[in-house]
Image: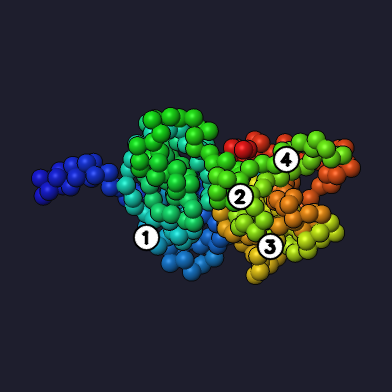
Amino acid sequence: MKKFLSLLCTCMLLFGIFSIPAQAASTQKCYLIRNANTTVYSNTALSRRYGTIYGSDELQILSITSRYAKVTYPVSGSRTKTGYIKTSDIFTKTSGNTYTSKAKITTYRRPGGSSYGYIAKGDRVLVLGTYGNYTQVRYPVSGGYKFGFVATSTVNTYIKGNGNSGSSSNNTQRRNLSAALYNTSAAYISCGFDGYRNTRGKHEGIDIKYRNGASVYSLTAGTIVRITYGSCGTNGLSTIAIYNASLNKTVIYLHSAPISGLRVGQTIQKGQRIATESWRGISSSSSSHTHVEVRNGRCLSAAKSVKDYTLENSNPTSFWNSMGYNVK
């Protein structure tokens, strides 16, 4: 038996196959995968309701099974409570493979959510399952581990793959904002933030252009809080407003044609198709583009740009960088 266990351990080390331990030997923290409230139970059968965990709550994981996880979570008065939740609320999988990171990589609380720190070059990373365009990982931090999410393309290149000559620059991991909006490197920024040259006023967003009729994809996850379809021409401004509660930011898309079937209250994933490039609210089809604007809080409308000389919005560069984009 001892020889068998020794051989099993050797194989696990060689092939990097690990499960999350049932009892946490060191501090392990995470957030809910979805930015929504979840029920806490007082028993492992998950039958006696005990409380609520909110999307903004950071959890400490105490133990894990395939069906339930025991966690500590914050409550009012700077106190904590301990209870049981469904394992699927916080894990995509409970086992995976380990790899050595080839670069410094930004992590996120949940798919499309706020940044959650970073994986250092050389860290041993446990890669779990995928959720949309993201992969869940466990990585070391001071005092223990965190479970976060990284874009799957980044995992494939910098964790599972050989990396980019071992570069640890965050810029190499980010995608250009224009390329992400249209899913093509041929798109480009036609007018930057506060970038008006021949128009009176202060530009409150970023204009990105590819070609009339091209598909437009959401740059963040969130919930649709407004849709106005509009029409082509000067007086037909269209609007799609997507609010991300965990970030407390609204991203507003103007001038493009919303695809049919979108509705207020609908959950949108990062990278989901939401519109096509158009000239709704613009005088000429040759000037078609998508105006992208970041606003603090839950907003239904873009800030006024034309003939208004006071900026309401802050420069969005740092926000887009934190979301994994270069403003290019």
Residue at image mark 4:
191
Query: Which is nearer the N-term, disc 2 or disc 3?
Result: 2
The three-letter amino acid code for the residue at tag 3 is: Pro
Q: Which of 166 and 109 is in front in this view?
A: 166
The three-letter amino acid code for the residue at tag 4 is: Cys
Residue 92, image x, y percentages: 43, 56
For the residues labelled 3 and 4, the Cα–Cα distance comes to 22 Å
Query: Which is nearer the N-term, disc 1 or disc 4?
Result: 1
Query: Which is nearer the N-term, disc 3 or disc 1?
Result: 1
For the residues labelled 2 and 1, the Cα–Cα distance comes to 38 Å
Residue at image mark 2:
181
Residue 155: quarter of image: top left
Q: Quadrant of the C terminus?
A: top right
Residue 64, image x, y percentages: 39, 54
Q: Quick check: can you spot residue 313?
A: yes
Q: Does 268 sit above or below residue 110?
A: below
Query: Which is nearer the N-term, disc 2 or disc 4?
Result: 2
Residue at image mark 3:
258
Name the residue at 56% across, 60% down. Answer: 38
Q: Quick check: can you spot residue 270?
A: no
Residues packed near mark 1 inside 10 Å, few (<14), some (14 to 19) or many (20 plus): few
